[in-house]
Image (spheres, helix red, strand yellow):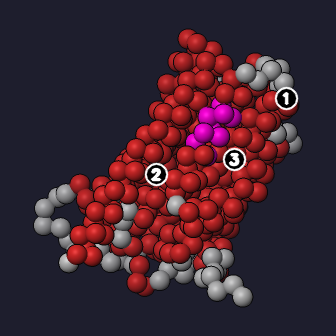
């Protein structure tokens, strides 16, 4: 008989669905808005890229303050409120007809997005039993990773038959469903507003969880490398004459990720982070190397599978470690700190890799990213070994007392 505590509760399903719908909107707009700017608003490619960057910058700006907001209003109210604002902002796309108002909309969308992802991550961490944290957050992260496939697929498929305005209307209706899902989430009273005493003096601890910074910085190097995939894989495939195969890249990525997630999640919980994270970093690096030498559709999809197997497990693993550095009361701060640095890696990568491609080409871009990931594996091993020694010394001292 299996006596393990349940992961798939009503609240966990509701928070996962909320996350899934929000990220469908995020990735649908990520892939369609640059086309909209260029084709409908007579914008340039650079302005199309700016539309993506503005939202990420807003999310990064708001993250240090989002945890305090959730402490003050409560995680449930913060979640429902931010999803409602995100949905209302989604409706505004229907009437936009020039670049400047679109930039404002994207900025406000990013602000609510930053609060949502802090709230969903913190609530999911609170809901999942402590003994199954790795597996549970792995399942939760699948909501975001599945949206990587579903969002662009819905958006690009709809554009074959309907106008952008209709796409925005459909997306707004989807997000109304997201509001209802957020309302179904039940948060334990013991995890709400546990750290609400006003500080006498300002401290950096009021904005971020300092203990989560080391692992969040390591994750930002990984997201920096992953930015080369989400920003340039379609352009790279098109340059190789593999545009049709590129549409299956994230499908293969998602399938491999889903199939591997349960076993990796169990290994994380039973054998520890290092057993999972270092092999996944090396697999991710191999996937990038294969990608750099790709000339055929088969190799492109092999690279997708390797990257899905490697990178697909890293995000929830790093997020779990960052949350475990903090108390339950500080889970929101740890989540905000993690995603602030993770998003910074994506935003920085989207910017600098364009210059690398222009100067050195796609092959060298992915080789550089592979080297970066291998160096990250070495850095993580050093960090984990040092952290373990520190914990062992603390346990020994506690035992002697």
Q: Residues within 10 Å of mark 3 (few under 14, many from 20)?
A: many
Question: On the image, numbered disc 1 is attached to which residue?
Answer: 297
Residue 68 horizontal/vertical position (percent) = 33, 64
Q: Nearer the viewer, residue 138 or 207?
A: 138
Can residue 127 be spotted in the picture?
Answer: no
Question: On the image, numbered disc 3 is attached to which residue?
Answer: 309
What span is colored magenta in the figure?
A: 280-288
Are circles 2 and 1 on residues that touch, CB within 8 Å? no
Question: Which quadrant of the figure has residue 207?
Answer: bottom left
Q: Nearer the viewer, residue 239 or 4?
A: 4
Residue 243 horizontal/vertical position (percent) = 82, 27
Question: On the image, numbered disc 2 is attached to which residue?
Answer: 339
Classify mark 1: helix, strand or loop: helix
Residue 170 horizontal/vertical position (percent) = 74, 55
Q: Provide the major secondary structure of the magenta segment.
A: helix
Task: Say which of marks 3 and 2 sits in front.
Answer: 3
Question: Which quadrant of the figure has residue 395?
Answer: bottom left
* Marks 1 and 3, how far apart at CA: 18 Å
* Marks 3 and 2, how far apart at CA: 21 Å
- Reply yes or no: does residue 383 show up in magenta: no
Are circles 1 and 3 on residues that touch, CB within 8 Å? no
Q: Residue at coordinates 63% horizontally, 76% vertically from top-left?
A: 7
State whether residue 49 is above or below residue 151. above
Q: Residue at coordinates 46% horizontally, 51% vertically from top-left?
A: 339
């Amino acid at each position: 008989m299996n006596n393990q505590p349940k992961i798939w509760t009503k609240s966990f399903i509701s928070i996962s669905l909320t996350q899934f719908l929000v990220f469908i909107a995020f990735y649908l707009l990520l892939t369609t808005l640059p086309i909209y700017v260029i084709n409908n608003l007579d914008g340039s490619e650079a302005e199309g890229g700016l539309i993506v960057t503005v939202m990420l910058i807003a999310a990064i700006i708001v993250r240090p303050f989002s945890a305090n907001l959730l402490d003050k209003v409560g995680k449930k109210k913060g979640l429902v409120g931010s999803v409602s604002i995100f949905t209302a902002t989604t409706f505004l796309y229907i009437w936009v007809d020039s670049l400047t108002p679109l930039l404002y909309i994207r900025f406000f969308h990013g602000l609510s997005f930053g609060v949502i992802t802090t709230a969903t991550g913190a609530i999911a961490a609170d809901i999942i039993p402590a003994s199954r944290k790795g597996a549970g957050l792995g399942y939760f992260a699948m909501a975001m990773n599945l949206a990587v496939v579903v969002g662009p697929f819905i958006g690009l498929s709809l554009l074959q038959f309907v106008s952008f305005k209709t796409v925005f209307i459909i997306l707004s209706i989807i997000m109304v469903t997201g509001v209802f899902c957020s309302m179904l989430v039940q948060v334990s009273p013991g995890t709400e507003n546990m750290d609400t005493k006003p500080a006498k003096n300002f401290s950096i601890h009021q904005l971020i969880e300092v203990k989560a910074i080391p692992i969040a910085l390591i994750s930002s190097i990984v997201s920096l490398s992953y930015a080369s995939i989400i920003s340039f894989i379609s352009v790279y495939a098109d340059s190789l004459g593999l545009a049709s195969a590129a549409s299956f890249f994230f499908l293969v990525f998602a399938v491999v990720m889903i199939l591997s997630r349960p076993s990796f999640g169990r290994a994380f919980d039973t054998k520890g982070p290092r057993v999972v994270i270092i092999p996944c970093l090396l697999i991710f690096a191999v996937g990038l190397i294969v990608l750099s030498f790709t000339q055929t559709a088969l190799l492109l999809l092999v690279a997708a599978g390797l990257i899905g197997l490697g990178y697909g497990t890293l995000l929830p693993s790093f997020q779990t470690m960052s949350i475990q550095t903090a108390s339950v009361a500080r889970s929101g701060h740890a989540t905000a700190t993690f995603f602030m640095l993770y998003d910074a890696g994506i935003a920085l990568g989207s910017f600098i890799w364009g210059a690398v491609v222009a100067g050195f080409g796609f092959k060298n871009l992915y080789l550089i990213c592979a080297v970066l990931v291998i160096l990250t594996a070495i850095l993580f091993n050093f960090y984990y070994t040092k952290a373990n020694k520190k914990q062992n010394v603390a346990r020994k001292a506690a035992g002697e007392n």
